[in-house]
Image: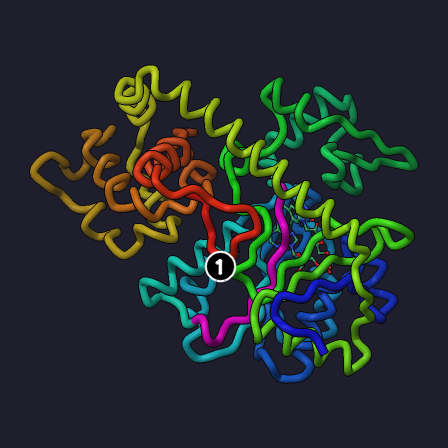
Amino acid sequence: MVAKGDMVYAWSTDADILKKGELGGAVTTLQKYALESGMVDAVLAVKKGQDLYDAVPVLITDPAELADTAGSLHCGTLLVTRFIKKYLDGAKNMKIGVTVKGCDMMALLELAKRGAVNLDNILTIGLNCGGSVSAVSAREMIADKFEVDPDAVHKEEIDKGQFIIEYGDEHKGISIDDLEEEGYGRRSNCRRCKYKIPRQADLACGNWGVIGPKAGTVTFIEVCSEKGADLLTKAVAAGALATEAPIPKGIEIRGKVENAMFKLGDKWRKNDFAALSKDLWGTIQKETSRCIKCYSCVENCPVCFTVADELKGESRMITSGEIPPNPMFHLRRFAHISDTCVNCGQCEELCPMDIPLALFSHAIRAESDVAYEPKLGEASYNNK
Ligand SMILES: Cc1cc2nc3c(=O)[nH]c(=O)nc-3n(C[C@H](O)[C@H](O)[C@H](O)COP(=O)(O)OP(=O)(O)OC[C@H]3O[C@@H](n4cnc5c(N)ncnc54)[C@H](O)[C@@H]3O)c2cc1C
């Protein structure tokens, strides 16, 4: 019997999931148990698409198919939760289990605040996240820095501050700090992120804190809600998962890693925002002058979709059919999300003109909320 606030090491008793899972396969096993037991009607997760760099969202109703979703895809950031609003009617009529990174969780909360999803019907299994790497950048980085053919890589992972690839019988790791100094590495919004353990999900799962003989083979779970406690308790009672108490030193190390990630996030914010502050308005004007008004930033934002029609429409300063639009188009959008941007990075990631939109909106968000200082280990998200 576990309760909210508990922490455990956990691993799957299903040999296939244990083998395919990133660590102990606990996340996949919990999703499978939730589906089999009727706690949810379907599971939303991701699985490998064309290649290792391609993460594809999948909705699963057959528990036997869940093993295909096991494993972490560090090059895929899809903002999985927006699919719940877009294609699943906001989980208003079905119960959904979903695997979420911190940005997915924050987006889900913003969607819920706007009435676009029903959180009561959503079971969230959170993944700690040190950050993800864009697929294009990962391929370039592997070819240029690792001097390996990206198509020869069969596994990538981020461990102990290194980006590691496995190809043939070999493996190679390079420090993420070194890669990032040279412009490779994690997405820029991930570098600035300070929501590393998604404690607003029902469970937060990761590898930080697993030390001793089980290092690298089990999942560290922090129980964050009654719903999460109920799922874990029942999955263990049914024999789907095995657990043991974490080594206390491991919990201490986990806290230190989280703290170090906070500091790294601060370092990147200082760096990115300082560069921007030299000529904020000039930079925004120059970068947004490439805008072709495809509206991808509006449509994929978990916050400003509620005013999409207004943002897309004509106004005193914005004329239909004119590109680039008057900068007021972007300023209106920034204003709408100024106190709620979750730094998911989708506006920038999906912009066909490579405009650093996430940097602009995150800088505005961070600047507008200076009085609030996040504290280590607190439950609410603080990725302002
Ligand atoms: C981008 C990324 C970065 C991570 N960084 C850290 C870290 O720094 N520290 C840490 O402790 N843990 C990190 N994790 C979590 C860790 O890699 C494991 O996912 C976690 O420990 C659960 O292991 P498991 O064996 O129980 O998961 P599995 O049983 O293998 O299940 C993995 C689940 O994650 C889903 N998934 C895979 N890739 C993604 C993705 N890109 N977005 C959303 N869902 C996805 C799968 O669909 C599946 O549901 C990261 C995960 C990801 C995806």
Q: Specify the amino acid type for callout 1.
A: Thr
Find residue 210 and report its horizontal and vertical position in percent. 79, 51
Could you tell whether 132 is left or right of 95 in the image? right
- Does residue 203 appear to the left or right of 80 in the view shown? right
Is residue 44 visible to us here? no
Can you give x and y, in whole percent of width and height, for residue 150 in the image?
Answer: 73, 32
- In percent of the image, x 39 and y 29: which residue is there? 355
The percent coordinates of residue 289 (x first, y second) are 28, 24
Residue 138 found in image quarter:
top right
- Taking the spot 46% from the left edge, 25% from the top edge, the residue there is 270
Is 123 magenta? The answer is yes
The residue at the point 72 percent across, 33 percent down is 161
Does residue 200 appear to the left or right of 63 in the view shown? left
Q: Which residues are magenta?
A: 119-130
- Identify the residue position indicated by label 1 in the image: 81
Q: Quadrant of the N terminus?
A: bottom right
Color theme of the render: rainbow
Residue 334 placement (x, y as % from top left): 28, 39
* 231 over 141 or under it: above or below: below
Camera-side residue: 226 or 352?
Answer: 226
Q: Viewer-proximal residue, 299 or 370?
A: 370
Q: Is residue 111 left or right of residue 381?
A: left
